[in-house]
Amino acid sequence: MQISYTEYENIIFHIDVNSAFLSWSALKKLQEEPGSVDLRTIPSAVGGDVKSRHGIITAKSIPAKKYGIVTGEPVVKALQKCPKLVLVESDFATYKMYSRAFIEILHKYSPVIEQVSVDEAYVDMTGTYSLYKDLETPDCPFPICVAHRIKDEVRDTLGFTVNVGISCNKLLAKMASDFQKPDKIHTLFPEEIPDKMWPLPIGDLYGCGKQTAQRLMGLGIRTIGDAAHADTEMLLSILGENAGSYIYASANGYGSTNVSGSYDDAKSYSNETTLSSDLNSDSYDKDIIPVLKYLSGKVSERLKKDHVYGRTVTVSVKTGNFKRHSAQMQLDNSIDDAKAIFDCAKALSDKLLLGTFGLFAKGEVIRLVGVGVTKLDDGSYRQMSLFDMMEEKSDNAPSIDTEKMKKLDAMTEKLTGAYGKGIIKKASSLKPKGSKEQ
């Protein structure tokens, strides 16, 4: 099918690094150990604690994929599929370095880049034909010629490969970039939807989760094309108005053309770990505290590094049957301190696992624990307690013992309860009546 791409008002690329974490770990290993095996050429994966062999797979090589290893599965299960699987630990400093270099290359070709994760971005190529028409050949028209230039520059200068999906909206560009990998370019314009997208399994539709896909398959909707031709009222009644509308519109190729040009700040900070042995009611008191302290500390480090605070603390667990459960706590004041996060996490963990209605009472064991903080702010509106004020005292100020601190905290609570949150203010923020700004 011959398509005149320049007739489309919008041209959008979705560029995705192939097996990003695995590729970047492989490059670092080759740099540190010249002549060593390239992890990308053997069954290998990034994930979990390499020594204990716990955790989940976060990236895998193409040879590992042939063994049925998938991202998100437990390391133990992956090793059962491929006992010789080579595991490497995550290295976020290296990932950040390569990600930055990747995005810098994209900025050479368009001023509008929407980075959606460390290893993927949308590039708005709308209106750039006059800039790149000299790259065209009869076999490689615009914008495919530009995609080749970007793909090859990333490979030749940085050493890893990308896929480029090209279309007139973000949804179709994303779908196209997920076609055959690695180091490939694919188009998916409206004329190509019946041949390229509709025959795919419904679960391959971007934004269609596993549970939604299972419900649709139960109704006989097995392909994206089936969803595109389904009765809309039926989809709305089964999936709800929002999900039903999204599935129908996406299956027919409708998507946003807005490439924002900004990378949203993180909306949450969380860390989780797979336990070396299942946690049960007998081992809970002994084992849970070091786990929660470790996770709270990691979350606190990241919050402080980015100079943000959070007002909601969440504890999540995964039971022996791989079901996830969570509990959360809303705070009056945003926090970033490891001790404060731990205190909340311990209370939530007790509520979730202990007692008559806790998971332990239902016979469950816990294999994974996570701690997260959401509802973020920059700290501008944090209410200062008397305790906070004392922490900001000068190094020469006399120390206050624990009992006095407790009394100060109790006084803060009483004053706040009686007169409202604004009653306590830092002395440095108050000015004498009639004073002038300096």
Image (cartoon, rainbow, N blue to C red):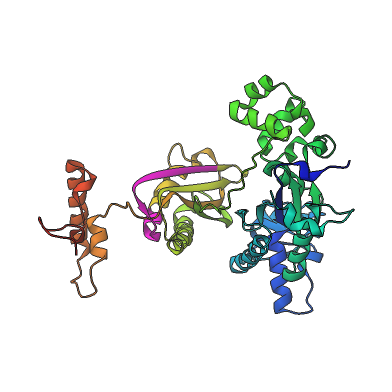
Q: In the rendered image of this protein, does residue 141 appear above or below residue 231?
A: below
Q: In the rendered image of this protein, does residue 235 appear above or below residue 398?
A: above
Residue in the picture at 67% in, 53% down: 123
Res. 433 image quadrant: bottom left
Residue 14 appears in the rendering: yes
Res. 431 image quadrant: bottom left
Horizontal side of 100 relative to 199 (left or right) equals left
Query: In what quadrant of the picture does the N terminus appear?
Result: top right
Count of labels in the image: 0
Q: Nearer the viewer, residue 380 or 350?
A: 380
Residue 336 in magenta?
yes
Residue in the picture at 71% in, 47% down: 11
Res. 248 image quadrant: top right
Question: Residue 24 location, x and y as percent?
Answer: 69, 66
Horizontal side of 2 relative to 355 (left or right) equals right
Q: Residue extending furthest left?
A: 433
Residue 429 in magenta?
no
Query: In what quadrant of the picture does the C terminus appear?
Result: bottom left
Horizontal side of 315 relative to 407 (left or right) equals right
Horizontal side of 178 relative to 285 (left or right) equals right
User: Magenta residues?
Assistant: 325-343
Q: In the rendered image of this protein, does residue 325 appear above or below residue 247?
A: below
Question: Residue 227 location, x and y as percent?
Answer: 74, 29
